Image: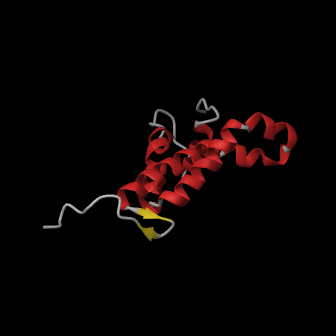
Amino acid sequence: MFRLNEVTWVFQEIVNTYGTPNYKEVNPSVFAIVTFPFLFGIMFGDIGHGFVLFLIGATLCLLSEVIKKRAPGMEGLLGMRYLFLLMGLFATFAGIIYNDFMAIPLWLWDSCYDL
């Protein structure tokens, strides 16, 4: 059994859907903490939608104690707050790279291929 906290729990659950690591094996959830949200961000790549996802994650992180007291049925959603936060951050970053806002292309900077 691995020691888990609020941040690593959801990533360990993602890894456990594919199989639990055996004795003396490296725990792949450590690598999944960065690679899973990063690859999601590369796939999603939108400034607007990624920022909305980031705001949802940030709101869940900031108001987690209040939500736990007033809405105990949202425990499952609160467990994924750091996943939402990281996925939104990387999706916003990739959206800036891709010049994409809500599926509308932006012209933030000129192309390096223009002559």
Camera-nearest residue between 108 and 37: 108
- Quarter of the image with the C terminus is bottom left
Q: Of all residues shown, which one is farthest toward the right?
A: 70
Q: Say left or right for 110 vs 96.
A: left
Number of marks in picture: 0
Q: Of all residues shown, which one is farthest toward the top?
A: 3
Q: Residue at x 61, y 48 (%)?
A: 55
Judge whether 3 appears above or below 91 on screen.
Answer: above
Judge whether 104 appears above or below 21 on screen.
Answer: below
The answer to whether residue 79 is seen in the rendering is: yes
Judge whether 103 appears above or below 62 on screen.
Answer: below
Q: Residue at x 69, y 43 (%)?
A: 60
Rendering coords of residue 45 (x, y %): 44, 60
The answer to whether residue 17 is seen in the rendering is: no
Q: Say left or right for 110 vs 51.
A: left
Q: Quadrant of residue 3?
A: top right
Q: Say left or right for 35 vs 53.
A: left
Rendering coords of residue 66 (x, y %): 80, 36
Camera-nearest residue between 7 and 113: 113
- Quarter of the image with the N terminus is top right
Q: Residue at x 35, y 64 (%)?
A: 107
Q: Quadrant of residue 97?
A: bottom left
Display coloring: secondary structure
Rendering coords of residue 58 (x, y %): 62, 42
Q: Residue at x 73, y 38 (%)?
A: 63
Q: Of all residues shown, which one is farthest toward the left?
A: 115
Rendering coords of residue 99 (x, y %): 38, 61
